[in-house]
Image: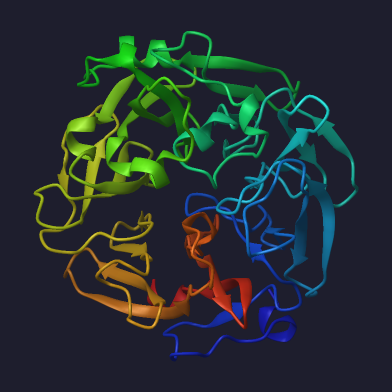
Amino acid sequence: MKVDACFPRYTEFEPKVPVWCVTPDRTGCLHRFFDTSPISPSGRYLAVFEMPFEDRQPDPGEAGNVVVVDLETGDNKVVAQTCGWEPQLGANINWGGSDHELYFNDVDTASWQPFAWKLDPLTGERQRMEGTVYHASPDGHWLISANMTTMRRTQPGYGVCIPLEGLRRNIGLAEDDGFYLTDTQTGKARMVASIADLVAEADPTIQFADWAHYEVYGFHSKFNPQGDRLMVSLRWFPALDEPRWNMFQLDRTAIRFAWITMKLDGSEKHCVVGPEEWVKGGHHATWYPDGARISMNLNIEEQGMRLVQVNADGSDFGKILPDALGSGHPTVHPNERYILTDCYKHEKTAFPDATVPLRWIDLKSGEEECIVRISVNQPHEDKVLRVDPHPAWDRTWRYVTFNGFVGGTRRVFLADMQSLL
């Protein structure tokens, strides 16, 4: 990467590692999430989403840009426009197995049907997929997602925007809605597990009984780094006579959560973190690099958020470190010596001026340091518009991409972590 020659250095608060702003000439830019690198498999390109505005949520049919940045030359260009986005994860842009495969969501505004594109950003050639994308397998062969429209029932920001009157409503355990795998070679999609299947077949079971009186929806879905196992999340809340959406705003305490793992054929389902644990408070689970364990934040002892881990079959559930505070979006490095995470501006590890740290935690000594301090202080009260850094490792586990709000707009940054590894 020729980042020093092409991009301005970020030097505020004296970062402990080299950091560059890689979207200096655009506004409203964000990369997807902490479990997905926006850097292409070769390391040359970076794909980000560019919001058309930053002061409100999108209305159905409003388009934003998919932008590809050349990290060798500094050039950037809009490679596609899409109506399939929301403010937290953009259009769920994922690279596939090569620089010629870029996946992102769109919405057919005639039918309000969401779908994913497979785009070659270097030639412009594209193929429409039957299904949608939340996460792509490491080799790009498969896409996984829940119903991208109903995710807004519990929390806007992560799916696609369609008219509210078109949102499906699941009361009880749906047999015809769940999680969907798309074969990117053929474009064909199939349901790998229904909501009813997940509840009926998980072992350990999900500890909840009153399903008939609750609305139940799929949300996050992720491949492990080996591409042979999935983790998916269910969310549910009490069903009233009138349909509701954005339950995070209406009554977040009414929502219950569960994480389930399974193979790509839907077998070996395990509830690894059930509602009896989630009710204590927690967030942001993801796979360990070994693909056999999961890390997350959880108020496991009800004495504050901690970093915890659990095996993919639900065993060996406990704290990673005795005392380290959990926050933000944690990922464990493959050397298993370090955890990298950020935090929300309301969490204990944040600074009082609406800047937040990238926390670098030594799993051997328990010591941590702030390696980068970045502003997330976007001025609008709507929490769906918040700026989360979402620090994400590239495929070489050397570079980290993250979001910030600097110079009055959302920008994307790149950090070289080599000196710390």
Q: Could you tell me if residue 229 is visible in this image?
A: no
* Image quarter in which the C terminus is found: bottom left
Residue at image coords 51%, 54%: 384
Using residue 89 as the reference point, say whether residue 154 is left or right of it. left
Using residue 29 as the reference point, say whether residue 276 is left or right of it. left
Residue at image coords 48%, 60%: 390
Using residue 417 as the reference point, say whether residue 147 is left or right of it. right
Could you say where residue 187 lies in the image, as x and y percent from the top left?
A: 74, 23
The colour mode here is rainbow
- The quadrant in which residue 37 appears is bottom right
- The quadrant in which residue 195 appears is top left
* Image label count: 0
- The quadrant in which residue 25 appears is bottom right
* Near-viewer residue (360 or 279): 279
Could you say where residue 39 lies in the image, as x and y percent from the top left?
A: 64, 58
* Image quarter in which the N terminus is found: bottom right
* Near-viewer residue (412 or 17): 412
When the figure is inspected, residue 352 is found, relative to residue 51, above or below; the finding is below
* Near-viewer residue (391 or 149): 149
Could you say where residue 348 lies in the image, as x and y percent from the top left?
A: 24, 70
Q: Could you tell me if residue 97 is visible in this image?
A: yes
When the figure is inspected, residue 297 is found, relative to residue 251, above or below; the finding is below
Could you say where residue 185 lies in the image, as x and y percent from the top left?
A: 74, 25
Residue at image coords 29%, 35%: 254
Using residue 324 as the reference point, say whether residue 181 is left or right of it. right
